[in-house]
Amino acid sequence: MEQHDHRFKIFSCRNSQYLAEKIAAKLGTTLGESEVTVFSDGEFQPRYLESVRGATVFIVQSTFPPTENLFELLLMADAAKRASAYKVIAVIPYFGWARQDRKDRPRVSIGAKLVANLLHASGCDRVMTCDLHADQIQGFFDFPVDHIYASSIFLPYLRNLKIDNLAIASPDMGGAKRANAYSRILSVPMIICHKSREKANVVGSMTAIGDVEGKNVVIVDDMVDTAGTITKCADMLKEKGALSVRAICTHPVLSGSAYERISKSAIEEFIVTDTIPLKQGDDIDTSKFTVLSVSDIFADIMNKVYNYQPISETFVF
């Protein structure tokens, strides 16, 4: 990076260090030094081990469960602000609570708005994130939000696969806009899987809208939690005559039996980013997964923001 009259420093919270190190390497630097003191009752306190006075401070942390990941980010931002940082920029590759973007039932919280308020109160001056569950969440913030699309990673990968008879599918009606963008850019047909939910995280019946037979289908989604919808969609597409089924997902939340469901499903390749790390273990099958890193696009936008360069081309889907 070019040097200004203020410095830049990149720090990471504990559970996103794997990604922050990649971003720092792309920018030709190393992570700043910090530590977290954990008390016997579970309370913790982050601390910077070097001066941040007058610096633009980037703090990298995806806010996937548990809640401590979000709270550690808030404490890090607060500590930077109180240490006289010039600007505090939260780099949140996966923005948790994004599914709570409206009151869809009586007497529920709007968690995404609350998180935006907490980030503002903690001292953040800007947020960088990727593939928000709902674009309108950007309006919950009273400071700039840089919303990056992971399509800039997924589209080149799909083109390199050179798949014949390709079709793009949305796992539900809510993802139709995203799937339509992929199908338009790739000039291929689109399929919509229509589902009815019995209750939260439980899918009832499902059918497909569009021509499935003889197609190599790629299902596109922003996040996958229990994998119930996407695996049921894949199995249904295969039954209707799809030659192959792949899936693309920006944020692999993958809770509960998600890994087992994917392993047993008709999905032959599950393409994800590293906004959330895949779980590891002898009982977890990750053989179907291909992980693409978001470190390049975050490093690029951080460099441009620091150097006051335009970033509008980054947001072209």
Image (tube, grey):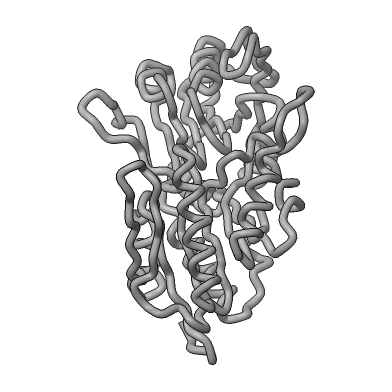
The x, y position of residue 289, in whole percent, is 36, 35
Q: Does 75 appear above or below 266?
A: below
- Tell me what residue is drawn at x 60 percent, y 65 percent: 123
Q: Nearer the viewer, residue 238 or 37?
A: 37
Residue at the extreme bottom of the image, as rendered: 5
- Which of these two is toward me, 85 or 1? 85
Q: Is residue 60 visible?
A: yes
Which quadrant would residue 147 be assigned to in this image? Answer: bottom right
Q: Give the quarter of the image for residue 315.
A: bottom right
Instruction: Identify which residue, 137 or 172, lies in the foreground.
Output: 137
Residue 18 against residue 261 in the figure, above or below: below
Residue 210 quadrant: top right
12 on left or right of 132: left
Residue 183 visible (yes or no): no
Q: In screen coordinates, is 241 left or right of 16?
A: right
Q: Position of residue 99 (x, y in %)?
A: 64, 35
Residue 261 percent across, percent down from the top left:
41, 18
| Residue in view at x 50 percent, y 36 percent | 248
Q: Nearer the viewer, residue 313 or 31?
A: 31
- Image location of residue 277, percent across then percent down: 37, 43
Point out the residue furthest to the left here: 282
Residue in view at x 55 percent, y 20 percent: 229
> Is 307 located above or below residue 234 in the figure?
below
Residue at 27% of width from left, 35% of height from top?
280
Residue 70 to residue 258: above or below? below
User: How many numbered tags mark residues here?
Assistant: 0
